[in-house]
Amino acid sequence: MGWKTLDDMDLNGKRVLVRVDINVPVVDGVVTDATRIQRIVPSVRDILSAGGKPILLAHFGRPGGERRENLSLKQLIPTLEAAFGTEVLFAADCVGTEADLAAEALKPGQVLLLENTRFHAAETKNDADLAAGMAKLGDIYCNDAFSAAHRAHSSTEAIARLLPACAGRLMQAELEALEGALGAPKRPVTAVVGGAKVSTKLELLGNLIDKVEYLVIGGGMANTFLVAKGLNVGKSLAETAMKDTAAEILAKAETSGCTIVLPTDVVVAEKFEANAPHQVLPADQCPEDGMILDAGPDSVSAITEIFGKSQTLIWNGPLGAFEIEPFDAATNAAALKAAALTRSGQLVSVAGGGDTVAALNASGAAKDFSYISTAGGAFLEWMEGKTLPGVAALEGQA
Ligand code: 3PG
Ligand code: MG
C-alpha cells in the first residue's frame, strides 16, 4: 500500500497529531459503546512508547461550525484516560493560542486532546488555513480515523499534505482486514443493508447491485421498497418520495443478476415502543394504523437460507428497530446464524457501522464475525470501490 505507517516515522521527542474517530455514542454523558476509543489505543501507546507526544484531533457529532457544549470532546476524557492508562490534557480549541501553548507544554508520557474540529465551519470545507493552524501544532501527522476517511475535511485531508504523514495502527488494520476479506471475495457475496433511510444509502444500493449476488434490505428502508412495489405500509417509517428511485433499483437488480431480498412477512405494532403489542403479518397486509418494526420469521428463514448459500457476507444496518425489544428479533436471529456459519468456516463475515456493531454486540454475534469495522459510511464507500480522501491523502507520501 502506498502509505507510511508509524514504523516508518522517527517519533522520539516529536509531537504527533493523531486524527482519531472518537465519535462514540453518549447517553446522559455516559459513553455507551467505547469500541472506537479502544481501537485507537494501539496507536497512542506505540507513539508514547517510542517517545512521541500524541495530540488527538477529532470531530464529535455534527455541530455545524458552532461551539456546542453538549458536543464538547471534554466529556470523553475519563473514558480516554481509562483506555490509555495515562493522563489526557485538553485544549478548548483545535487551533489558536490555547492549542499552541498546550502543544508546546506537552511532556513525554502525556496525551493532549484538542476540542471538536467541527466547532469550526471551515473543517468540513477542507479549508487550508484551518489545516495549517492544526499542522502548526505537530511535527508529524498520523491518520488513525478510517471511519472518517470518507470525508475530505481539514483534519483528514488538507492537513495530510502539510506534514510528514502516516497511517495509524487502526487505519492500517481496517484497510488490511477489508482488503483481506473483501478485496477478492469468495462468491456468492451477500450484503445486508438496513437502517432508516433509503435516501442516505441510495447510491450505495445502486452500486452494490453490480458487486453482490444477494442484497438483503432491512429496517425502515425496506418499507420504502415495499411502497415501491405498491404495498401499503400504514404508519411505518418510509420515504414515499423515494419510491420511484427504489423501483428503479429493483428493476436494475433484475437485469444485473442480483437478487434483492425484501421482507415477505413483517412484525407490526401500533406504536414505536418497547414491548408494544404486535403481530406478524404478511408484508402486503400492514393495516392503516400499523407500523412495521421488524422483519417476520419467514423473512428471517429466507435470509438465513441465503447466508447458508453464501461465502461472503457484508453487513451494515439492522433489519428492524433493534434498539427496542422484541423488535431486535430478526437482527439477532440473522446475526447469530451468520456467526455460526463463520465459526464453522463456511462464511467470511464483515460488519461495520455504529448501530450494526451495537446490535451485533447485543446479540453476542460480534465475537464470531470475521471482522468488525469501526466504520459505517467509510466502510460502505470502500466497498463500493470509491477513493477515500483521507486514505488518498496519505498515499504518495511513502
Ligand atoms: C461516523 O460516525 O460515521 C464518523 O465519525 C463520520 O461522521 P459523519 O458521518 O458525521 O461525518
Ligand atoms: Mg455516520
Image: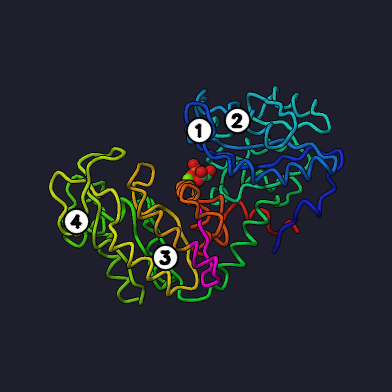
The residue beneath circle 2 is 76
Residues at circles 4 and 2 in contact by the CB criterion of under 8 Å: no
Amino acid type for the residue under numbered disc 4: Leu
Point out residue 187 in the picture as x, y percentages from the top left corner. 48, 76
Front disc: 3 or 1: 1
Front disc: 4 or 1: 4
User: Is disc 4 surrounded by few (<14), some (14 to 19) or many (20+) residues within 10 Å?
Assistant: some
Query: Residue at image x 75%, y 56%?
Result: 4
Q: Secondary structure at mark 1?
A: strand
User: Mark 4 vs mark 2: which is more N-terminal?
Assistant: 2
Q: CA distance from mark 3 to mark 4?
A: 31 Å
Residues at circles 1 and 2 in contact by the CB criterion of under 8 Å: yes
Amino acid type for the residue under numbered disc 1: Val
Identify the mark at residue 281; answer none if there is no mark: 4
Position of 111 relative to 249 (above/below): above
Q: Is residue 100 magenta?
A: no
Front disc: 3 or 4: 4
Position of 256 relative to 101 (above/below): below
Position of 90 relative to 126 (above/below): above
Instruction: Write down the quadrant of residue 158 in the picture.
Output: top right
- The quarter of the image holding the C terminus is bottom right
Amino acid type for the residue under numbered disc 3: Asn
The residue beneath circle 1 is 26
Residues at circles 4 and 1 in contact by the CB criterion of under 8 Å: no
Query: Which of the pair 315/4 is nearer the observer?
Result: 315
